[in-house]
Amino acid sequence: MPEEKNNGPQEHFLTLISWEAEEYTHYEKPKDWYWALGIVAIGFLGLAVIMENILFAILVILGGFAVGIYGSRKPKVMTFAITSRGIKADRTLYPYDNLKHFWINYDPPHIRELYIISKKTIQPQITIPLGNTDPNNVREHLIKILEEKEIHESLFDTIARFLRF
């Protein structure tokens, strides 16, 4: 049965379904992954030195460290919900007025995601992990509110999955 939630003065809504999932799929990185990252970073650093471009060299060093740190970071567990006002990801609410359509990409055990196309140009595609929730239950609620239209995995997501990022 749906439950009423009140998370603030303007956030009164009915929760239709909720679930918890890690914010992204985490892959344990072997030492070889970090060695490959270092070799690629050194290669670009060498290119920056040859081009005598100090700004590029600084960006390569910072980028290499950032990718290494982000790659080793563990995902946090988030709460997701389909509500009467929109789709909620932890404290962020995506109102239905700002959403065009959705698609559930379900190919266990690797892919269990809800794709949403937003009307906003800054964040056109939103990917929400389904975790262990029943995708048919999610679809049953969303089909009443949004149009279901096939959405392909973004190029960024495909590359990240290939690189086990």
Image (cartoon, helix red, strand yellow):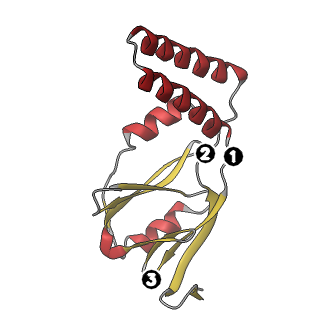
* Local secondary structure at mark 1: loop
Q: Are marks 1 and 3 in contact (CB under 8 Å)?
A: no
Q: Residues within 10 Å of mark 3 (few under 14, many from 20)?
A: some
In the visual, does 153 lie left or right of 135?
left
Residue type, mark 3 in image: Ser
Question: Which is more foreground, mark 1 or mark 3?
Answer: 1
Q: Residues within 10 Å of mark 2 (few under 14, many from 20)?
A: some
In this picture, is 106 found above or below 18? above
In this view of the protein, which residue sits in the foreground, 77 or 18? Answer: 77
Which residue is labeled 2 in the image?
25
Residue type, mark 2 in image: Thr
Residue type, mark 1 in image: Lys
In percent of width and height, residue 74 lies at 69, 46
- What residue lies at 62% left-to-right and 36% top-to-bottom? 71
* Local secondary structure at mark 3: loop
In percent of width and height, residue 4 lies at 57, 89
- What residue lies at 55% left-to-right and 26% top-to-bottom? 61
| Distance from the alpha carbon under mark 2 to that under mark 1 | 9 Å
Which residue is labeled 1 in the image?
74
Quarter containing the C terminus: top right
User: Which of marks 1 and 2 precedes in the sequence?
Assistant: 2
Q: Are marks 3 and 2 in contact (CB under 8 Å)?
A: no
In this picture, is 5 found above or below 57? below
User: Which of marks 3 and 1 precedes in the sequence?
Assistant: 1
- Visible in this render: residue 165? no
Which residue is labeled 3 in the image?
84
- Visible in this render: residue 142? yes
User: Which of marks 2 and 3 precedes in the sequence?
Assistant: 2
In percent of width and height, residue 20 lies at 64, 64
